[in-house]
Amino acid sequence: MTVSRRKLIEPQITPYYHIINRCVRRAYLCGEDPYSGKNYQHRRGWIVNRIKQLSEVFCIDVCAYAVMNNHYHLVLKIDTQQQQALSPQEVISRWLQLFNGHPIAVDFVNNGDVGVDKKQALSTLVAEWQSRLGSISWFMRCLNEEIARKANKEDDCTGAFWEGRFKSQALLDEQALLSCMMYVDLNPIRAGLVTSLQDSDFTSIQQRIVECHQTSIAKKSTLNSSSIKRSKVGLLPFVGAEHQAKQVGIQFDFADYLELIDWTGRSIRDDKKGFIPASQPKLLQQMGVNGDAWLDNSNDFMEHYTNVSGKWSRMCSFQQHFGGRWCKGKVASQRLHPN
């Protein structure tokens, strides 16, 4: 039975979610279509650029993304603190970047105020829009509708572009977040499209590597960092555990993440024959995670879990909170979280 989206996304329990969406009939509508012979690779750029625009409007951060030939993955974080701190002017300004303005809102923007008879209507509008600015469902609606319209116009056709509504998985703890991000970043390598992270086009890991390289060049030269060409999506940064209290971001060091994803990627490549080095990456040691369990979990993340991932006890609590009666992923969760 299909579960209501509002029962799968609850920012008060966890702000992190893995989102998946596929093209209709899983056709290669964002890649090279073997049936028509047409190449739609440029549409992957459309998706990345739209994600960038929406991440600047919505109070939703992008942790990871991978845009493939017939589907895409996102790891998103809902920033409820930023959402609640928005002023009415900020809410209206953000919303009008995406939709034609309501006459009352436009009047408020132009004149700085509205009549007494319109204040209640304006307050209701602002409250509704502010709620939507922290909604993954509205984020996805704005993303998918825009891409579908552009693609249908390009193909001079009508009808569905996406196979259905998006799927989501709640990520309940840091292991689940890290494992899912790695699953997303390694998508092109697992699909056999590329053999290195640097060549993984339209992915967050390629973007982060480019950003890191550009920052390194800027520090070694006299160039102002603002003159360096910025990447497409404003990703939620890695801030390191020691800076977590002062900075908003992912509580790991990017160098440690890069080491772990490189190790994980090399372990699943055919030319490495599943070889696992004797010394495990630093992050696995810090989290107390077994290397074999990590590889199994990262390689087959979607097969192990349905709409929630994390410690088994937290997965059960999440489902029970919404009246759910079962969870998928007990064996995988207990291998990854032995305690």
Image: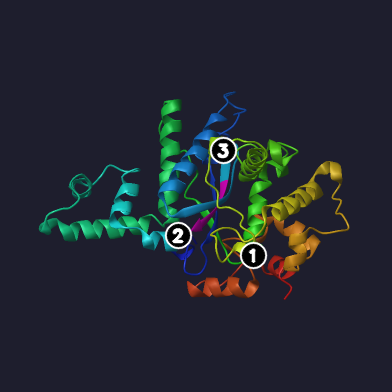
**Foreground disc of the pair 1, 2:** 1
Residue topped by disc 3: 224
Where residue 121 sits: x, y (%)? 19, 58
Point 34% across, 57% down: residue = 130
Task: State how many labels appear.
Answer: 3
* Location of residue 291 (image quadrant): bottom right
Give the residue type that dot 1 points to.
Answer: Glu
Instruction: Estimate the x, y position of residue 50 in percent, counting from the top left.
Output: 46, 40
- Compared to residue 3, the image places residue 218 above or below, namely above
Residue 168 position, x and y percent, is 53, 56
| 175 sits left or right of 57 in the view | right
Which residue does the numbered mark 2 point to in the structure image? Answer: 5
Q: Secondary structure at mark 2?
A: helix
Quadrant in which the C terminus is drawn: bottom right
Q: Is any part of residue 115 visible from this angle? A: yes
Mark 3 nearby-residue class (10 Å; few <14, some 14–19, many ≥20): few
Q: Is residue 159 visible?
A: no
Can you name the residue that lies furthest to the top here? Answer: 37
Residue 5, magenta (yes or no): no
Q: Is residue 98 left or right of 28 when viewed as pictured?
A: left
Q: In the image, what residue occupies the spot 55% across and 52% down?
A: 236
Question: Where 315 sits versus 119, above or below?
Answer: below
Q: Secondary structure at mark 3?
A: loop
- Residue at which label 1 appears: 242
Type of the residue with mark 2 = Arg
Give the residues drawn in magenta, as a range. Answer: 73-79
For the residues labelled 3 and 1, say whether their Cβ atoms are less than 8 Å apart: no
Residue in the foreground of this view, choosing between 77 and 30: 77
Q: Earlier in the sequence, mark 1 or mark 2?
A: 2
Q: Residue at x 46, y 65 (%)?
A: 7
* In-image side of 34 versus 292 (left or right): left
